[in-house]
Amino acid sequence: ADMFANEEGGPEPDWVITEREQFSDFRDLNKDGKMDKEEIQHWILPQDYDHALAEARHLVYESDVDKDQKLTKEEVLDNWNMFVGSQATNYGEDLTRDHDEL
């Protein structure tokens, strides 16, 4: 109710519909309409999800202007705020070290 108060007969926003689908398709694994301890654990700490790889793909996707799957120094600098705010770069610390690939 803090994020969305459904008015009687009013339409649900798209994000609510998407969240309902995510819940029923991916979160509620035993289809009982609620999440138990194991389902919450799978959601919070999925075994088959590589957080570092996902963050790296996100940074490349958002910063790679010419979509060649490679980042130039200019592309990184143009999106410096995204890299400095990323856990993948140790919140910017790794960007201060010398890197041949840059």
Image (spheres, grey):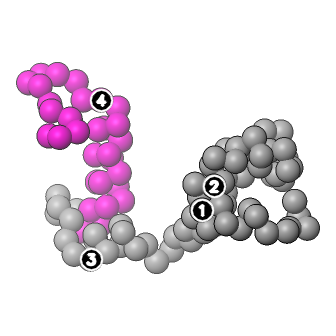
Q: Nearer the viewer, residue 60 or 8?
A: 60
Task: From the image, tell me which residue sits under label 4.
Answer: 13
Q: Residue 52 appears in which quarter of the rendering?
A: bottom right
The amino acid type of the residue labelled 3 equals: Glu
Residue 8 locus on image (x, y percent): 8, 24
Q: Within 10 angstroms of label 1, few (less than 14), some, or many (20 or more) residues? A: some
Task: From the image, tell me which residue sits under label 1.
Answer: 91
Give the mark, 3 or 1, whose residue is nearer the N terminus. 3
Q: SS for tag 4?
A: loop
Residue 101 locus on image (x, y percent): 88, 64
How much space separates mark 4 and mark 2, taking CA atoms? 33 Å
How much space separates mark 3 and mark 1, taking CA atoms? 31 Å
Residue 62 locus on image (x, y percent): 67, 44
**Are the residues at dot 4 and dot 2 in contact (C-beta closer than 8 Å)?**
no
**Are the residues at dot 2 and dot 1 in contact (C-beta closer than 8 Å)?**
yes
Q: SS for tag 1?
A: loop
Give the mark, 1 or 4, whose residue is nearer the N terminus. 4
Residue 61 horizontal side relative to residue 26, left or right: right
Residue 38 locus on image (x, y percent): 26, 77
Q: Within 10 angstroms of label 4, few (less than 14), some, or many (20 or more) residues? A: few
How much space separates mark 2 and mark 3, taking CA atoms? 34 Å
Q: Within 10 angstroms of label 3, few (less than 14), some, or many (20 or more) residues? A: few
Q: Nearer the viewer, residue 90 or 33?
A: 90
Residue at x-position 30% and y-position 38%: 17
